[in-house]
Amino acid sequence: MVTEKENLDVFVWRGLAETGRFERYEVPAQDSQTILDVVSWIQQNLDATLAYRFACRVGMCGSCAMMVNGEPRWTCRTHVRKVLRGNQLKIAPLRNLPVIRDLATDMDPFFDKWVAAEGHHHPTRTRDDAIEALDPQSPERRAANAGIECINCAVCYAACDTVANNPDFLGPAALQRAWTVHNDARDGDQPAILEAVSGKGGCHNCHSQGSCAQYCPNDLNPMTAIAGLKRASVKSFFKRER
Amino acid sequence: MLDARLYMLQRITALIMAPLALGHIAVMIYAIQGGLSAAEILSRTQGSLFWFAFYGLFVLAVSVHGAIGLRVIIYETFGMRALLLNGLSWIIGAIFLLTGMRAVLAVTLS
């Protein structure tokens, strides 16, 4: 049984990045209410023109990330009760990305950097070859496994101060993906990956502040992955020099 | 704005600086046991190729290391364009090198 509760004081970013502003909405508090529930309630009951993005509602698709009270969160799995300040919520579009409108950001720069970091599979076999046996306990496989649960939500990208200050920086998610592929025994072009992450926006720009690991909703650690890329690039530097 | 080449340069110069800084501190502690005077320091360093090489290498490493470090800070703070940033970094490195070598020469030339 839902008991009568007071309303939440919700401030939602409306409009564009430069000309927009926070607007106040009153939303009835519910048990087990998530931030996405709050945003959807506003869109369904108060203002149908509110732009925001979601898909799965269960923390798998990585579509619904927003800034909640100044911190990046996956809104479908963030309970209001955990992040409420006083009785207030401040919901804004993800940091470090261009705003399309309201809570919807343009994710293109984020995904373009995934491509730029060479974080895709470089095949070594054809469909006619036998399936390659992998040792799940090998150090390389463990390092690869550590990053494969990334859902591309861009929470780490929004949390990263290096991205904020250095627009060229590929960012935690793309670099973690590159490290994952680099450690995959089935991948055939590790030099291309190291080359891609060694440019002016590459892994060497990371200051190891750790906001990516702090905010990752899946408890991944892109900072460790980036440190791995740095080590691998140093090794390859000395090999080439000899 | 830190590619692999600059990153390696900064790490290698750090590796050079660390033992030199420790050596400097160790000699300092050892040398002041009998009191500290300019004459005593200069008697050790003037005309010494070793101390010229020791501090000359340190100044060289500092110039490269510091210029790269400040380059990152300047870029991330002011978002300067590459050409301007590179020019400024070279100037900063040159200032470190010139002032540092001036000091090294002042105590090692006999």
Image (cartoon, rainbow, N blue to C red):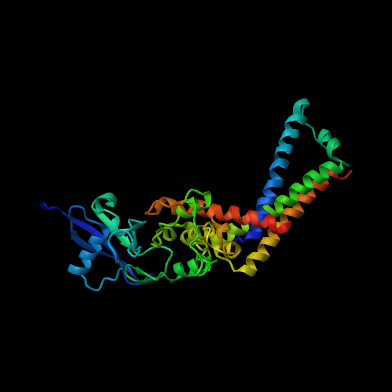
User: Which quadrant, please, contains the C terminus of chain B?
Assistant: top right
Instruction: From the top left corner, tell me how far across and down residue A83 is, in percent.
Output: 29, 51
- Residue at x 23%, y 61% (from the top left corner): A38
Instruction: From the top left corner, tell me how far across and down residue A109 is, in percent.
Output: 46, 69
Instruction: From the top left corner, tell me how far across and down residue A78 is, in percent.
Output: 29, 55
Frontmost residue, A231 versus B108: A231
Q: How many marks?
A: 0
Left or right of B47? Residue B36 is left
Q: Is residue B84 visible?
A: yes
Task: Determine which quarter of the picture holds residue A217.
Answer: bottom left
Q: Please, is residue A127 above or below residue A70 in the view?
A: below
Left or right of A235? Residue B102 is right
Instruction: From the top left corner, tell me how far across and down residue A220 is, in percent.
Output: 42, 52
Task: Determine which quarter of the picture holds residue A197.
Answer: bottom right
- Residue at x 46%, y 60% (from the top left corner): A173
- Residue at x 19%, y 69% (from the top left corner): A44
- Residue at x 84%, y 42% (from the top left corner): B50
